Image (spheres, rainbow, N blue to C red):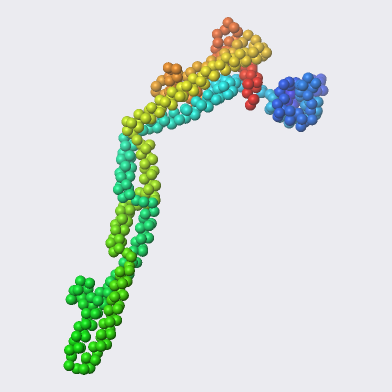
């Protein structure tokens, strides 16, 4: 750390010396990003393939940095340090006190051997939790949901009785507009025909213009005065004209294509549709959309014994699948735990802890039936958490005869730091992300 990114201070120079220097040699760490840093700085590796980084500070406080035989800015060494070094102190030991961190260390070491069954476990777990939650919801709210279902069913029955068609209300409005105009024309023509020809049923009290002209002709024809009789032919002409008008009015009425009763039928249908649009939506298309949504809601509100039994069966089916995946995760972790323990123990032998041994235990987290995420795996009731059913713990034996104890209890602060360093080295070999 001092070589690559520590702060240079003149106080670090020993009294009587003009300069303090720190040199670091790195071997076998030249991934692509490290090679780029060296190449960009113009540095070169030694004949044995190692890379030397050097940092010096003079008594006057001026600092110099070298990488691969070339003078470089201190920031280059800092960048290199970020890529190559993990600095551990006693405060870092707190990470090892967290069970989740210990499980994460094991999973990173195991790689795809754990990651793949854990992915499958999580997929099934998500669906299992959703079914469990839905079953609990339907069971606890069965009375309330039954009341809501009754209201929805009543609305659906009312809509089904009317049986509206998409866009029917708009179509009927257009027909009413058209038929209303036709009826107004029919009324005008019918009134005019009655005024010309008289009542259709021959009511003598409604003789019409033709009847009145006929009566006037009869009176004039029988008059003794020739002046009056001379007027009769002119009335005859008027009668002929009115006959023509009456006939044309009759033809006009016969030519109207509206059924006199159709408007009444349409108005009655509109009234039926309005009973729905007043309750459920502003128009019929909205009413139909409400019905579709109500049917979907009813399907999710089914609290019948059959529906609850089907959900319970699906829950149990998913639980069985989840237990298989959980067991696979546990098995993969158990295999990886032995390998991780051996690798960390070997690294500790080079860190002044040659007698120490690391054990990594994988135990399922027991629970009881009150746990909403309780899952039975191999006959044991365990907590099905988001990272599986296992608790992982690092154990340390200070020497072969010592009992294995949790690492944070068996090791001093300095030893914990060395354990963490050993873990980082092992992970660097096993995990390409490190």
Percent x, y of residue 322: 46, 24
Q: Residue at x 29, y 72 (%)?
A: 250
Percent x, y of residue 83: 69, 27
**Observer-nearest of 85 and 46:** 46
**Observer-nearest of 280 and 304:** 304
Horizontal placement of 221 versus 376: left or right? Answer: left
What count of labels does the image hold? 0
Quarter of the image where the C terminus is located: top right
Q: Quadrant of residue 216?
A: bottom left
Specify whether residue 64 is in view. Answer: no
Horizontal placement of 216 versus 422: left or right? Answer: left
Horizontal placement of 50 versus 422: left or right? Answer: right
Q: Does 124 appear above or below 245? A: above
Q: Residue at x 28, y 84 (%)?
A: 238
Q: Residue at x 31, y 72 (%)?
A: 251
Percent x, y of residue 28: 72, 21
**Observer-nearest of 397 and 164:** 164
Q: Does 399 appear above or below 91? A: above
Q: Residue furthest top?
A: 401
Quarter of the image where the N terminus is located: top right
Specify whether residue 258 is in view. Answer: yes
Q: Quadrant of residue 115?
A: top right
Q: Quadrant of residue 310?
A: top left
Percent x, y of residue 257: 33, 65
């Amino acid at each position: 750390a001092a070589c690559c990114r520590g702060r240079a201070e003149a106080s670090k120079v020993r009294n009587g010396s003009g300069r303090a220097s720190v040199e670091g040699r790195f071997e076998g760490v030249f991934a692509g990003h490290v090679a780029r840093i060296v190449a960009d700085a113009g540095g070169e590796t030694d004949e044995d393939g190692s890379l030397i980084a050097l940092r010096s500070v003079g008594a006057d406080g001026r600092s110099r940095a070298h990488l691969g035989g070339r003078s470089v800015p201190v920031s280059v060494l800092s960048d290199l340090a970020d890529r190559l070094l993990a600095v551990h102190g006693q405060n870092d030991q707190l990470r090892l006190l967290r069970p989740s961190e210990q499980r994460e260390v094991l999973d990173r070491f195991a790689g795809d051997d754990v990651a793949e069954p854990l992915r499958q476990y999580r997929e099934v777990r998500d669906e299992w939790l959703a079914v469990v939650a839905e079953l609990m919801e339907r069971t606890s709210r069965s009375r309330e949901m039954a009341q809501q279902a009754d209201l929805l069913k009543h609305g659906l029955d009312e809509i089904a009785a009317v049986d509206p068609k998409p866009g029917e209300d708009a179509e009927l409005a257009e027909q009413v507009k058209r038929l209303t105009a036709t009826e107004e024309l029919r009324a005008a023509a019918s009134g005019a025909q009655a005024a010309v020809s008289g009542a259709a049923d021959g009511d003598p009290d409604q003789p019409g213009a033709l009847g009145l002209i006929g009566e006037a002709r009869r009176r004039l024809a029988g008059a003794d005065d020739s002046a009056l009789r001379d007027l009769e032919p002119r009335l005859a002409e008027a009668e002929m004209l009115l006959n023509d008008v009456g006939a044309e009015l009759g033809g006009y009425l016969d030519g109207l294509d509206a059924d006199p009763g159709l408007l009444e039928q349409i108005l009655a249908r509109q009234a039926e549709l309005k009973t729905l649009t007043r309750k459920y939506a502003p128009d019929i298309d909205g009413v139909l959309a409400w019905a579709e949504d109500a049917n979907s809601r009813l399907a999710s509100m089914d609290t019948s014994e059959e529906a609850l039994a089907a959900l319970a069966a699906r829950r149990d089916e998913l639980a069985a699948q989840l237990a298989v995946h959980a067991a696979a995760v546990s098995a993969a972790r158990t295999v990886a735990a032995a390998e991780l323990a051996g690798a960390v123990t070997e690294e500790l032998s080079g860190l002044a802890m040659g007698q120490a041994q690391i054990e990594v235990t994988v135990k399922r987290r027991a629970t009881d039936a009150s746990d909403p995420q309780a899952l039975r795996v191999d006959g044991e009731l365990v907590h099905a958490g988001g990272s599986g059913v296992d608790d992982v713990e690092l154990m340390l034996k200070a020497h072969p005869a010592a009992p294995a104890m949790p690492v944070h209890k068996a090791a001093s602060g300095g030893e914990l730091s060395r354990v963490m360093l050993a873990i980082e080295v092992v992970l660097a070999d096993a995990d390409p992300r490190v």
